[in-house]
Structure formats: structure tokens, C-alpha cells
Image (tube, grey):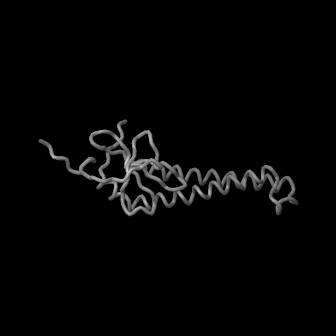
Amino acid sequence: MEAKIISIEEANRMLPLLKGIVGDIMMNWKAIIEKRAELECIEKGVRGFEAGLDLLDRENDLRDLKHQLNSLIDKINSYIREVEALGCFVEEFKRGVVNFPSLYNGRKVFLCWQPGDLSVGYWHELDETFNDRVAIRDLSEFLCHNPVHE
């Protein structure tokens, strides 16, 4: 299946919806990291306040944490599917970076955005990351929303 090509204007129109979805992804990603750390501590038996717990309590805690972790992962996967249904991709969960497939002087590139950016103002090559982004300087070099057919 060919990836959708998205103009800068289309990407900017998606931002109000993406801000909410990406905010949920970032919040759930943070919770996943915290639950993983908590799970690791319980598995290693290093949590101070749980030192006195018997084996059954510890097993219940492990089961509950694993259930919570799986639930968070399911939520993130659902949010990712929402973003991908729009034709774009989440590059990084922690910072909420989103890539939009587009065209720059006729070749495929990614427009990119992260929460805090007022609009889509950067792009990078397909084999690069958000850290390699370049500011969009000339809109005419990118796919126009309504290309003129001759």
C-alpha cells in the first residue's frame, strides 16, 4: 500500500486532532516507563515498602502491574492506529514527534512536528530523524495543496 502524500496545509489542518492524540500517547508512554520500572523493582524484590510482603502479595502485585502495563500498551497501539489512519506516523513517543509523508522538489520526505510547535515548520529526509530536521524556508518547494494540472 502506497503511503499517502500530505501537503503542509493538510498537515497543519490535522494538528488540532493530532495534539490530543499525541498528548495521550506521551502520557501513556510515561506511564508505561513508570510501570516497567515498578515491575522490575518488584521482580527483583528491591522495593523497600514491599520487603515485608509475602510471596502471594508479591505475585498479586506482579499480576496487577502486568495487567496495567498491557492495558497501557493497548491504549498506545490504539492511538498509533488513529495517527496512521490520518496518513502520518509517530516517530517518537516520549516527545510526541509526528512525521507526515510529503514531497520536496518532487522527492519523498517527511514533514515533522512535535507538541509545542505552532505549525508544521520542519522536514527531514526519509532516512533521517527529527533531530536532523531542517526548517521549511520556501513553501513552493513542497507539494502544493491544489497542484495546477496543465
Q: 69 and 135: which one is in front?
A: 135
Residue at 76% across, 56% down: 61
Side of 98 where 35 appears, left or right: right
Residue 1 appears in the rendering: yes
- Identify whether 70 is placed above or below 128: below
Side of 136 where 81 appears, left or right: right
List x then y, in percent, for residue 126: 41, 40
Residue at 40% across, 46% down: 124
Q: 136 and 101: which one is in front?
A: 136
Side of 39 where 29 appears, left or right: left
Residue 87 appears in the rendering: no
The quadrant of the picture occupied by the N terminus is top left
The quadrant of the picture occupied by the C terminus is top left
Residue at 86% across, 59% down: 51
Side of 17 where 78 appears, left or right: right
List x then y, in percent, for residue 144: 24, 49
List x then y, in percent, for residue 63: 73, 52
Q: Which residue is farthest top?
A: 1
List x then y, in percent, for residue 142: 28, 48
Residue at 64% across, 54% down: 33
